[in-house]
Amino acid sequence: MNFHSALAVVRDVVKSRPDAIVVNEGANTLDFARSIVDMYEPRKRLDVGTWGIMGIGMGFAVAAAVTTGKPVIAIEGDSAFGFSGMEMETICRYNLPICVIVFNNNGVYRGTDVNPSGGSDVAPTVFVKNARYDKIIEAFGGTGVHATTSQELSAALKEAVASGKPTLINAVIDETAGTESGRITMLNPQANKKK
């Protein structure tokens, strides 16, 4: 999957469930979701805002579920999820109707960056390859799903929203599909240095 094919699935589920609240954070995940996932009722999208604070999504999701009782679909970049992913325990403890979708592309923007220092460590923007975020929620009694195709993502998301049970879908995204958020590479001092 890439961001577009995965978010098209989310778009279709939200269209069929306009009462669902969408929480959205990440870099590419946030940017693309804003233009792909439409909203059909007012006050149903919560995101970090332009240049917002990463890590607020899980708190938003918990608050939205508690105050409304409506299904919540939390669209999370893997980096953004890393800031407050342990809220899976809270979601499971209170059996909240939240489905978290972690867009897992193995890193920030892309999971293919190279360590700029030339050392043997991975680049700071690269995460553990093929991480299984779905296992985190299973540790707390929720439902974890590993989705590698749009069809798997669609089936899992529809089931999660219908069940109202805590669910985390690890949506595997092509690690080369991302781009620098805001497309501001030209502001990077290294990019200017090469000119």
Image: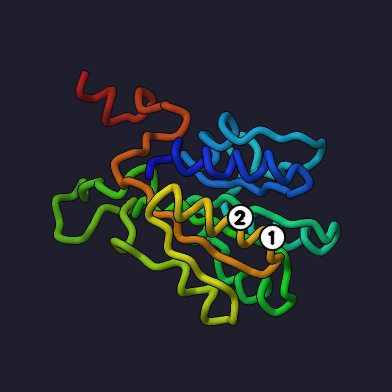
Residue at image position (49%, 74%) is 136
Tag 2 residue: 158
22 vs 31: above or below: below
Residue 64 pos. (x, y %)? 78, 56
Residue at image position (72%, 42%) is 45
Residue 76 pos. (x, y %)? 54, 52
What crowding class fits label 2: few (fewer than 14 Cα within 10 Å), some (14-19), or many (20 or more)?
Answer: some
4 vs 169: above or below: above
Q: Is residue 76 left or right of residue 15?
A: left
Residue 125 pos. (x, y %)? 34, 51
Q: Along the line of sight, which residue is nearer the eye, 154 or 20?
A: 154
Residue type, label 2: Lys
> Quick one: quadrant of the C terminus?
top left
Q: Which mark is residue 77?
A: none
Which image quadrant is residue 176 in?
top left
Residue at image position (21%, 46%) is 116
188 vs 55: above or below: above
Q: Is residue 191 visible?
A: yes
What crowding class fits label 1: few (fewer than 14 Cα within 10 Å), some (14-19), or many (20 or more)?
Answer: few
Q: Is residue 8 left or right of residue 64?
A: left
Residue at image position (81%, 64%) is 66
Which image quadrant is residue 84 in?
bottom right
Tag 1 residue: 162
* Dot 2 and dot 1 residues touching (CB under 8 Å): yes
Dot 1: what SS?
Answer: helix
Q: Along the line of sight, which residue is nearer the eye, 6 or 102?
A: 6
Q: Is residue 79 visible?
A: no
Residue type, label 1: Ala
